[in-house]
Image (cartoon, coloured by chain):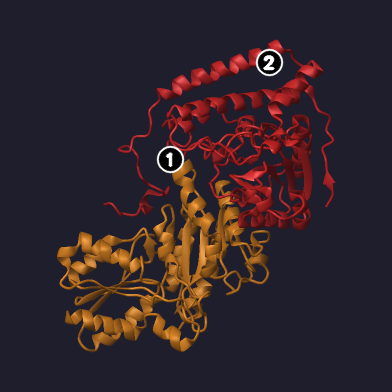
Amino acid sequence: MSGGITYLEAIRLAQAKVLADDARVFIYGQDVGSFGGAFKATEHLAKEFPGRVLDSPLSEDAMVGMAIGAAIEGMRPIVEMQFADFSTCGFNQIVNHAGTLFYRTGVSCPLVIRLPSGGTAGGGPFHSQSMEALYAHYPGLVVMTPGTVEDAYSMLIEAVAIDDPVIFCEHKLLYNHLKAEALPSEALPAGQAALARPGRDATVVTYGAMLHEALAAAETLSSDGYEIEVVDLRTIKPIDTDTVLGSVARTGRLLCVSEAWPWGSVCAEVIARVSSEGFGLLDAPPQRLNAKDTPVPYHPDLWSSHRPTAAAVEASLRELLRM
Amino acid sequence: MPVVSGQTPILQEQFIKAFRVMLLARLLEKKLASLYRSGLIRGGVFLGKGQEALSVSVGIHLNKSDIFAPLIRDQAGRLAFGDTVLDTLRTYLGSQLGSMRGRDGNIHRGRPREGYYAMISHLGAMIPAVSGALLARRMRGETGVVGATCVGDGATSTGAFHEGLNAAAVEKLPLVLVIANNQYAYSTPNSRQFACEDLLDKAIGYGVTGHRADGVDLADCLQVVGAAIHDAREGGGPQIVVAKLLRLVGHGEHDDAHYIGSDIKKSALGRDCLALAEARILDEQWASEKEIASWRKDINEEIEATTAKVRKEPTPDPTEEDWCAVSEARLVDNFLS
């Protein structure tokens, strides 16, 4: 890919736009101020928007708790977790406070928590996690997993506009590698999946960085004459079951791919829904490909076998096509 | 940081007003206990008997435009801040017309739009939430706002307490954190809860101002909590108030509190703040026994009439419930469809 705008820059520009457009927006997180964030997703924003990009103490519970109070008072806070993995330290506020507030009190809780998610070579067990299924399990939360530069930009802008708490899982591996020519002028709404590649022989349902592994596998298989359809979920919760079922109706075969752990994963949910609501559409047992059920290993050689890769997706697809 | 005590002179008018709210809270809670024992309240009943003087002192010094996040033993503070007998009974009895509509119960009630936050059960969690609300008010240019929240001795051991108070101190927010050290967190005594000499020592560690109140003495609570709220309002940053007292009931009405020894019950901590306040009123001749009896009668009549009304109200209907946890309908997951 050529062009100038990276996935990370799209996230920074989306934040600059919402800060400029909406006086209710502010950013709160560790090192997000003059330092510009651990990944530079807020670079220059503190200077550009004085008093609205605030360094927090190293306190994930307090960061989310503060955002909840501010949201109740009508603000639109964006919390940056330094790594998705550390959001477990703010887990209670996210799932028990932000996630329950509207149902309990009728008062909505419009905040966005940005989770730099997923593995990178050398990241290791505590800087690599994919937490979308964990948050999707809890009622009251919207969970987004953008897999393209365009979605990183437009979905973050939409996340801020949404009246409910949004867990925004941005993938670190895509930060600097993924580029686009231009920012999008229009976008699919949250909760709608995208057909990333049309096909007829099998469907891959995926999201986030795995989208690109799936697309690469589909490209490889096309040289053998297979046409693989790739569905990018974009939003994990709410999940777009209709688009998934529509694709399975065309192909009859389903492989769900995710970088998260297998147990109770998004893949498990997708397969459960397709089995329950679209059993008759299936010509073969639905399959899934997840990360291995261990902590994410540090060494790049172990890590690259722990996560699904294009080669692994291709192998799973070949197996599915033989069934 | 200096440990300061209140300096505002006690006003007879404020003392009487506070006493009447305490009396209302005590009699209302007595009714709640009775309804619980009759099986008319489902779930728990958690009472604040013995803590009314401290609690009322928080609610009474807050303005309507302030923020208050009470905890489980704050019936008096809630009523002083503007909660009503009607909504209390509606929530406990599960009326569909209550602020929580049967979706949450008992002490987990509030009206966040009115600055009256609805606690979650996880202790200490409301400290950063109130702090964030104060940050928002400040960002919008509102001045003179105070946010108060209450915890017990148990909550001082939580991570949320530490993180919330520290973050509030870093931002120099007008937070008043009132710690009712009622000696037991459920059954766990202070000796198994913390190892510092005095909870007030924590003020130094967080860089906030600490205030000590005598939790059974209404006049002292009014003075000290009033001073703390005043100082926060005037830009003094976070204030903590620590008051020792004794919970005069179980953790909840299911609990006989057998673990509270007779020695501590007979000690100065075990005195009843309501009885002491009543004695003070009589001693000062601010009101006669006859007048207090008439207040009691009026309160009981209000409680009985409201209970009768609420018991006739509809309870939530599961077939009418929308079972929707997000406010934007387009984002409802189609799990059941």
Q: Horizontally, is A322 left or right of B146 in the view?
A: left
Among the chains pictured, the one given orange colouring is A
Q: Residue at x 58, y 38 (%)?
A: B257
The image quarter in which residue B280 lies: top right
Q: Which of marks 2 and 1 is nearer the N terminus?
A: 1
Q: Which residue is drawn at 79% across and 49% down?
A: B209
Residue linked to disc 2? B292
Among the chains pictured, the one given red colouring is B
Q: What element carries label 2?
A: helix
Q: Which amino acid does label 2 sit on?
A: Ile
Residue B60: image location, x then y, percent: 69, 31
Residue A155: image location, x then y, percent: 44, 64
Residue linked to disc 1? B103
Q: Horizontally, is B242 left or right of B93 in the view?
A: right
- The C terminus of chain A lies in which quarter of the figure? bottom left
Q: In this view, does B308 lie above or below B159?
A: above
Q: Residue at x 30, y 54 (%)?
A: B334
Q: Horizontally, is A318 left or right of B35 in the view?
A: left
Q: Which amino acid does label 1 sit on?
A: Arg
